[in-house]
Image: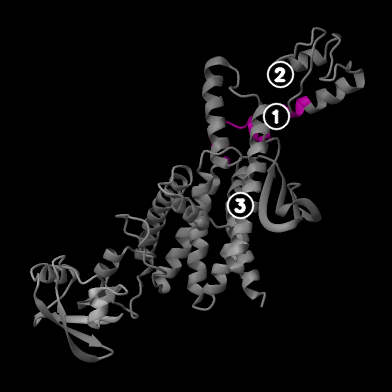
Amino acid sequence: MFLWIIVALVMFSVIVLVHEFGHFKTARIFWVKVYEFGLGIPPKAKKLWKDKHWTEYTLNWFPIWWFVRLKWENLNYFLIYDKDKKSYPQEELKQILESDIEIFDKLWNSISEDDRKKLLIELNKNQDKDNLVNKSYWQQSIIILAWVFMNFLFAIIIFTILFTVWVKPIWINDKIATNLDIMMFPTIEQSIEKWLLIENPWIYLYPLTWSLADKSGIKNDDLLLKIDWNTVTNSDEVKNLISKSSWKELIFEIDRKWKKENINIKIWTDWKIWSYLAPNIKYNKEFEYQYNLPKSFLIASKEVYNESLLTFKALWTLVSKLTFPNTKKEREEAVESMSWPVWIISVVNDAMKWWFSIILILASLISINLWVFNLLPIPALDWWRFLFMTINEIIRKVTWKKWIPPHIEWLIHLSFFVLLIFLSIIVTYNDVVKIVN
């Protein structure tokens, strides 16, 4: 009963582990101290062990995430004031703390000699060589953006394995218009080109209730073979033949459950029979992808790249419908399409009814979505931290000062982190409602 829950949680944890391992490994390469590598969202439940680099591996109370805590991702920042209630610049603090000048904290309490010594110890830690912020700009950038490479590589490895063993497309994309050649969810046109869908002659009819077609005896799923003994192969031919037959009675030859019948329909002046037309397309059950290992790697790399572009496009479409919808229903549909790990668990449950490759495909798609999501310029996410760092580095080169002080940057990240948690709760509630319904 709970097997699908376990599989989904393990799958999601592995993907996030790959993401955080990128930060962890690059931090180790550049000699940045890693305080903690944790499973789950704090508070801490148990310390599992500590390695020779003094990194703690911990288990936290909400085991659905991984995180890496690096040494001094932001420098220690202290607000110290003079007698006129004016704060000292951070670069002058060491000199001030070592002097005999009377100084005050933000509550206007005089700072004692013992507190000066403690502040100096913490302030001197800002100069430690194993601090993240004391590394060069390019080293910090690699550590912060390591997840891009890791999640991208993880998805490529999965698809390489699948394309080498064998894999089928998981669905046909009829929602997002694109010219990208995506193997896992091609468009209808691409599916026909690849022979995933086999387009046969003749047309399926689905008459509207009380329409001319309905009153004449046409039923749903009737296969239209001929009109007045003219074989029809697509919907355009059907429309063309009917449009030339005002006030004429046409003979419709249909196939109804492998029995042929002729139905006479007299066309009126509007040249319509009021029926939906559907192409006679069949799914090719024998279709699959399978290549040698080198070709699989190349195709997998292209697949991950194209799926990433499609994810960006889908995300932009979602945001557009949420912020500037054409109709109220369009916004409701956009909200309905938003999903989180709870919904992923439900999808995995369905996937396990088919074959294990579906689960691997979902894992790669989530990995792609994770790195695309982190590329959004939203505070608290890695890309925004990189953007902050880049802007600060440019301004520092010019003015020798940071654009945004560390404590302000920290508050911005914290505020948006709380906002993201709040939004995740709303989306999770939406997922639970979907599953219950």
Q: Is residue 342 above or below residue 38?
A: below
- Mark earlier in primary sequence (3, 2): 3
Whole-percent x, y for residue 183 in the image: 36, 64
Q: Secondary structure at mark 3?
A: helix
Residue behind mark 2: 90
Q: Tell me the distance, in whole angstroms, between the alpha carbons under discs 3 and 2.
A: 33 Å
- Mark earlier in primary sequence (1, 3): 3
* Relative horizontal placement of residue 23, taking residue 222 as reference (left or right): right
* Relative horizontal placement of residue 235, taking residue 74 as reference (left or right): left
Query: In the rendered image, which quarter is residue 294 located in?
Result: bottom left
Q: Are marks 3 and 2 in contact (CB under 8 Å)?
A: no
Q: Give the residues in magenta.
A: 123-144
Residue 14 is at least partly visible in this image: no
Quarter containing the C terminus: bottom right
Q: Residue at x 53, y 33 (%)?
A: 387
Residue behind mark 1: 75
Say few, some or many: other residues with alpha carbon within 10 Å of mark 1 (under 14 / 14 to 19 / 20 or more). some
Query: In the rendered image, which quarter is residue 252 located in?
Result: bottom left
Q: Tell me the distance, in whole angstroms, between the alpha carbons under discs 1 and 2.
A: 10 Å
Q: Amino acid at mark 3?
A: Phe
Q: Secondary structure at mark 1?
A: loop
